[in-house]
Amino acid sequence: MPVYKAACRGCHGGCMYLVTVEDGKVVKVRPDPEGPLNRGRGCVKGMSIVEQMYHPDRLLRPRRRIGPKGSGKWEDISWDEALDEIAGRFSAIRKESGPEALALISGTGRHHLSQFWRFGNVLGTPNATSAGALICLGPRKNAGEFTAGHFAGVDYYGETRPGGILVWGANPLISGADGELSFHMADALKEGIPLVVVDPKPNALTEKARLWLRLRPGTDGALALGILHQMIENGWYDREFVENYTYGFDALRERCGQYDLKKVSEITRVPGDQIVEAARLLGRELSPLAMEWGCAVEQSTNAFQTCRAIFMIPCLAGSYDAPGGFVESMEIAPTADLLFDRLDPETAKKGLFGDYPINDGRLTPKLFAHPYLTLEAIRTGKPYPIRALLSSANNTLISMADSRHSFEALSNLEFFVYMDFFMTPTAELADMVLPAALWPEVDSIFCMPEFGDVAALSMRKTVQVGECRSDEDVFLEISKRMGLSYGAETQREILDGILKELGRRRPEYAGMDLETFQNLGWIAPERTYYNYKTRGFDTETSKLELYSERLARVGADPLPYWQEPPETPVSAPDLLEKYPLILTTGSRVMPYFISNNRQIRSLRKLHPFPLVSMHPETALAHGIREGDWVWIETARGKITQKAKFLPELDKDVISCEMGWWYPEAGAPGYGWEESNANILTVGAPPHEAEGGAYSLRALLCRIYPNPDCTIEARYNAWINT
Ligand SMILES: Nc1nc2c(c(=O)[nH]1)N[C@H]1C(S)=C(S)[C@@H](COP(=O)(O)OP(=O)(O)OC[C@H]3O[C@@H](n4cnc5c(=O)[nH]c(N)nc54)[C@H](O)[C@@H]3O)O[C@H]1N2
Ligand SMILES: Nc1nc2c(c(=O)[nH]1)N[C@H]1C(S)=C(S)[C@@H](COP(=O)(O)OP(=O)(O)OC[C@H]3O[C@@H](n4cnc5c(=O)[nH]c(N)nc54)[C@H](O)[C@@H]3O)O[C@H]1N2
Ligand code: SF4
Ligand SMILES: [Mo]
């Protein structure tokens, strides 16, 4: 029986698997003991791939809606029919209303994301957007690029082990890889590598941490500046590094002076002595210092500047690109060419970017339409109508802020094409649904340029399931049928181009063809450290830019600053009487990836219901016992989740899960309004000034019991069928 090496993409990815195929079907998968990142380890998501691939509800062929929108009535059609209709309607809209009347939406980083942006440029529309990006990884990555010229990650792989890890607004034991794979954090814990954790909520890491800073949600920027202030004033930083390799230290020092201990402690609720201790540990004692940070710091109206401040902590400690430290991204393999030059400059100006310099081309070459503003244009026809939308890998109703707003917008589309593995509540609003290939069904080259990447891995098409196709293949086909050049005739050409560029960057792999790469399964070049010492930083000043002239030139603050989020006890005291509690949403759980996998029974059994965490005294004061279903209500609406007690949580902080819908509730709604955190959130301005991020981690809410909830009964009737 053939056994193939293939990279799993059940999360952001990185585990190599051995995939056994029998009679054209995948029959078994097991983590590859030699996988360079996972070394024989895997998680429940990866291990459930056979169940996912052959699930009876899997979409296997394209379908077209036959009833009214949202009626749940569909007919199967052929790919030819589907692609011709899409190409025909897109071409007509493009001709009548301009390419900007076509929009694209995606989500977090999947295998086809670079080609998603490429497809937007090929169509000639600047209105390509994502429900992730500007509240996930974008701000962290931009902070890295605007400060050091590159992003950085933890060096778990070299001979020197980290001397300490700062874990900020992330729970990598569960959410890896959003940084490195979770196994590495588990190993670090076992080895006793000391951690400093910044999180309002207790978890397995806060329990073991040398220091846990339990801050008020949404105050990360103030805490980071407060820690930097203590590091600088107490001399707990690497003087040699600062003198030789940084730009703007005195200006940063002056800015940090505004964040004295008393003020920061008041804002964040972290006791002053803990802020000082954190600065000492991070700046001096725990060396080399590595850092895992998460999207919690980005889902805020202060995202980018908070990320800049946090990024500077391991840098000032002298641990940037140090063995065992916070190491520069190796950028081993390029992604597919985004073909920016295809976008007509006049059309590009019409993009729905908002007045945000990170998105509108003033600060980076990559254009990024704002997801809320794009949905708002779809909803209202202003500033101009968006007539068609193609959604690839984004369950908008669940993951985008303000779900009811998304519902109104998507219901208003003239032509909506949606691509996924399964039907979802968002799919039910579409006119056409396309079946997407899962990871063992796609050929691709994968490397995590965003993280402390150490390998390029092979994604491998091992079998064909139904008529499922990869998203990138569909982008190429639509382009061809519209008479637009995709810059390649086949996906193979694009992969060959990537290998060619890889060989240019790493001459030891020059001339390698796809078959060789796929048989090897991966390549893992050696890391070199302290690259800045030989070639300077990849910034305009060749230094690490604490002060950024680039930001100053577009009128953005050249130094990090902090601002209170728009809906907190401090900024919206008038709401407190009705909504006295602080709500943060998110908190990943192991079996799911955002809104995926709720229909995979083996996974669902591991975590059948969404949990809302609260202090026991707060619960009791509201008549709630542990395990009760609870209403969580904000000024936007209410949802229900099951109560979990956490005595170490602040009494006025509530934390609920995101990503919930109920496949067992059936079409067309699948219970999308019942437990979906984004019923509670806000996508409308005020946004973050630099990139337009919005707050998902600091809102005001109230809670009360929901004694009549039928979600469990419905689940029990379904789970063993
Ligand atoms: N198993 C699994 N893995 C995943 C995902 C998944 O859904 N499931 N999702 C992937 C994606 S897209 C991403 S972005 C990452 C996300 O992974 P993480 O960044 O780890 O995100 P969360 O687990 O949502 O939240 C992390 C921590 O932030 C804390 N937090 C909440 N509010 C605040 C705050 O205001 N400040 C601070 N400092 N902390 C706060 C929460 O208590 C939680 O412990 O995970 C990726 N990996
Ligand atoms: N309230 C709140 N909202 C959040 C967050 C939060 O913490 N709190 N987190 C945010 C973050 S960090 C992110 S990144 C976004 C993520 O948002 P998204 O990445 O858009 O996640 P989902 O909405 O789960 O949409 C993913 C859909 O794509 C499908 N899919 C997966 N892989 C593929 C593929 O290869 N091809 C196709 N066609 N479909 C695929 C899945 O089956 C699923 O239905 O959500 C954000 N929303
Ligand atoms: S951690 Fe991610 S890449 Fe590894 S097995 Fe799980 S889902 Fe797959
Ligand atoms: Mo994300």
Image (spheres, grey):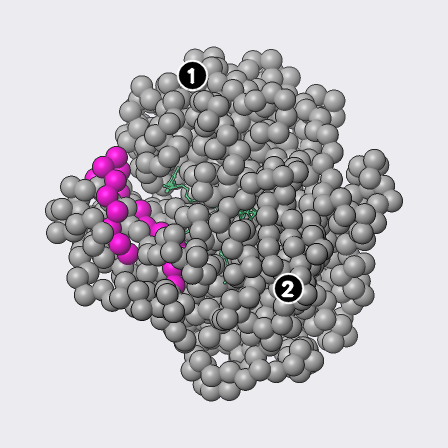
Residue bearing mark 1: 280
- The answer to whether 494 appears left or right of 690 in the picture is right
**Amino acid under disc 1:** Arg
**Amino acid under disc 2:** Lys
Residue in the image at 67% along x and 33% along y: 539
Q: Is residue 497 above or below residue 105?
A: above
Quadrant of the rendered image containing residue 92: bottom right
Secondary element under disc 2, as helix, strand or loop, is strand
**Image quarter hosting the C terminus:** bottom left
Residue in the image at 45% along x and 61% along y: 600
Quick check: can you spot residue 684? no
Q: Is residue 655 magenta?
A: yes
In front: 260, or 49? 49
Quick check: can you spot residue 445? yes
**Image quarter hosting the N terminus:** bottom right
Residue bearing mark 2: 25
Q: Is residue 91 above or below residue 221?
A: below
- Looking at the rendering, the stretch of residues picked out in magenta corresponds to 641-661
- Residue 36, given in percent of the width and then of the height, sits at 65, 37
- Residue 158, given in percent of the width and then of the height, sits at 63, 25
Is tag 2's residue or tag 1's residue first in the polypeptide sequence? 2
- Residue 96, given in percent of the width and then of the height, sits at 65, 80
Q: Residue furthest right?
A: 511
Quadrant of the rendered image containing residue 561: top left
Q: Residue furthest bottom?
A: 67
- The answer to whether 336 appears left or right of 313 in the picture is right
